[in-house]
């Protein structure tokens, strides 16, 4: 039986690239039958990465059958995975998020979670010497995953391991990191084709604190003004998205990758209060700038206070 | 803050030795403050291992405080851990059991689960070259953990990695494996001091299948006759243990390490039916011998049928 390798339901670069990288490793090095899958449409940056390295877009999976062999990467959260995931035969998990609980395996399997910026960096470690056998496209995907998850080393999630590996891969590929990252981020910033609701759900995690549930959304961009032009429409779409998704509030952080700051939309007094308590700031208008804030994992979620 | 490193609530050799090994690694190699703890009284084999290598018995922990830093080894099952475990600050998990779900971490941390026979083998891999710095007592504990969990390589859970490491450690220590294992198993077989209820709970995991809950207990011994002499008293104790622990049935498998077979006590028709369906056998009396069965993980739990 072919093993399906996939990440989470909102495929960014790491959740698109890492399944391809690991399916390559399982097939070419371990001699197993494995194929990458996606659980949704890749975002514009992930699509650019596929095109840049001549990689085929993996097929999109709606759900998994009972007993389907799967390898889960870049998440361990059942809410971000197919509904039937615990009836599948989970053969491995490779992730860099906090353990949220809820996944079960049938027997003992390999599970590797590490506090690194990027899933692909963990994969490189797991491959050991076999990593040198990666073809150019797989190396390229790995490099893009790291640059994406670290925002070209700007994110406080960046570790020396992520940085050193990216630099080594770029050298090996004969590529200049700033040029590659700049093209990648331009692709990520091109969100004109998405509706407001799509933007609010594109890179989003549900999080509950103090009895209030949030959809915590992040838009990483080199062109925040493009998104901010749509501020009124985004604020108007928030209550609909919140109600459809069963959360109390939608928080949209527009992360300016180059300036290393986030702009939070402030649609109502509840969000205003959350923003002031969480980030020791004062907001008067319908946006507030949070200098230095770029990481949901390290800077937004841990500080969120109701 | 000192990190407490501990295994599960019924400390066998691996759950006693692995916390000591990892606390040594954290302290001496990583330069952190860490101490091994136990969640119960070590079994007779584990106590023998401590004595054999001159290791101090770790203090027994009743529960963990909110925010206590902990590293969990040899289990990922909240039912086998302190009641307050999810309020603790779990900093790492190293285990070789199936993922059961239920544990949560505060942030991304190192989690390593591998389908090896023994937690200590995984630790050796994680240490890399630093493993060579282990003092004799830590190497000895590691060797005992592997020989215990593999039943001196007899268990089908044994992998080449477990075996190769044990052989290398024995060579390094100038020790003959058969002699060490024989003394260890003799210690494990000395269960005269325990009550019937204690024997039924000593090496036991709860498991539910087909709507029936079981306490699946294993007694590994080189002297099954010693336990079988107490058969009537054990059968009499079963309903009390089942009712106190809130399970429907207690299954006691007396594993003859040297003959590589298990004798299951058959106290009633329900267990008789389970035995016949699970192990394709016929039982007439109050015991049934299951040739080749030595591993709860690989041979008992996966076959259990109601």
Image: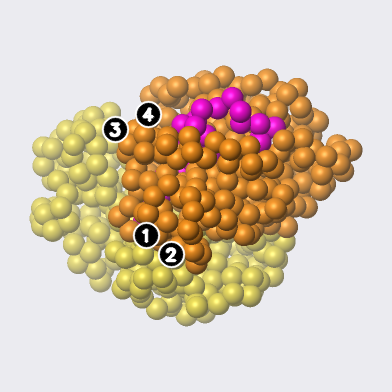
Chain colours: A yellow, B orange
Earlier sequence position, callout 2 versus callout 1: 2
Give the residue pinned by disc 1. B306
Q: Which of B111 and B57 is in front in this view?
A: B57
Give the residue pinned by disc 3. A279
Circle 4 SS class: loop
Could you say which disc has been placed on residue B277 in the image? 2
**Which tag is nearer the camera, tag 4 or tag 2?**
2
**Residue at the image point whose x is 17% and y is 49% from the top:** A247
Circle 1 SS class: loop
Earlier sequence position, callout 4 versus callout 2: 4
**Residue at the image point whose x is 58% and y is 41% from the top:** B228
Which residues fall within the magenta stretch? B187-209
- Distance Cα–Cα, label 2 vs label 1: 7 Å
Badge 3: chain ID: A
Q: Is residue A189 magenta?
A: no
- Same chain for the residues at labels 2 and 3, yes or no? no
**Which tag is nearer the camera, tag 1 or tag 3?**
1
Could you say which disc has been placed on residue B69 in the image? none
């Amino acid at each position: 039986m072919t093993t399906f390798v996939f990440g989470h339901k909102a495929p960014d670069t790491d959740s698109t690239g890492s399944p391809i990288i690991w399916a390559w490793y399982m097939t070419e090095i371990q001699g197993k039958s494995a194929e990458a899958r996606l659980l949704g449409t890749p975002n514009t940056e992930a699509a650019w990465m596929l095109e840049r390295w001549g990689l085929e877009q993996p097929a999109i999976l709606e759900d998994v059958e009972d007993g389907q062999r799967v390898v889960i990467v870049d998440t361990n959260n059942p809410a971000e995975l197919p509904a039937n995931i615990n009836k599948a035969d989970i053969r491995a998990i490779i992730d860099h998020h906090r353990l949220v609980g809820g996944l079960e395996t049938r027997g003992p399997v390999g599970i590797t979670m590490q506090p690194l910026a990027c899933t692909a960096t963990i994969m490189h470690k797991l491959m050991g010497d076999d990593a040198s056998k990666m073809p150019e496209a797989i190396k390229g995907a790995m490099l893009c995953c790291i640059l994406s998850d670290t925002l070209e080393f700007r994110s406080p999630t960046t570790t020396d391991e992520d940085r050193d590996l990216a630099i080594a891969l770029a050298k090996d590929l004969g590529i200049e990191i700033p040029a590659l990252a700049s093209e990648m981020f331009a692709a990520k910033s091109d969100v004109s084709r998405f509706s407001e609701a799509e933007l609010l759900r594109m890179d989003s995690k549900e999080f509950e604190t103090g009895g209030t549930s949030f959809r915590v959304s992040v838009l990483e961009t080199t062109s925040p003004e493009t998104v901010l032009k749509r501020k009124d429409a985004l604020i108007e779409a928030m209550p609909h998205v919140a109600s459809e998704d069963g959360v109390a509030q939608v928080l949209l952080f527009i992360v300016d990758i180059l300036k290393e700051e986030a702009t939070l939309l402030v649609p109502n007094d509840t969000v205003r209060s959350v923003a002031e308590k969480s980030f020791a700031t004062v907001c008067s208008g319908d946006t507030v700038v949070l200098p230095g804030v770029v990481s949901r994992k390290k800077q937004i979620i841990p500080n969120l206070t109701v």
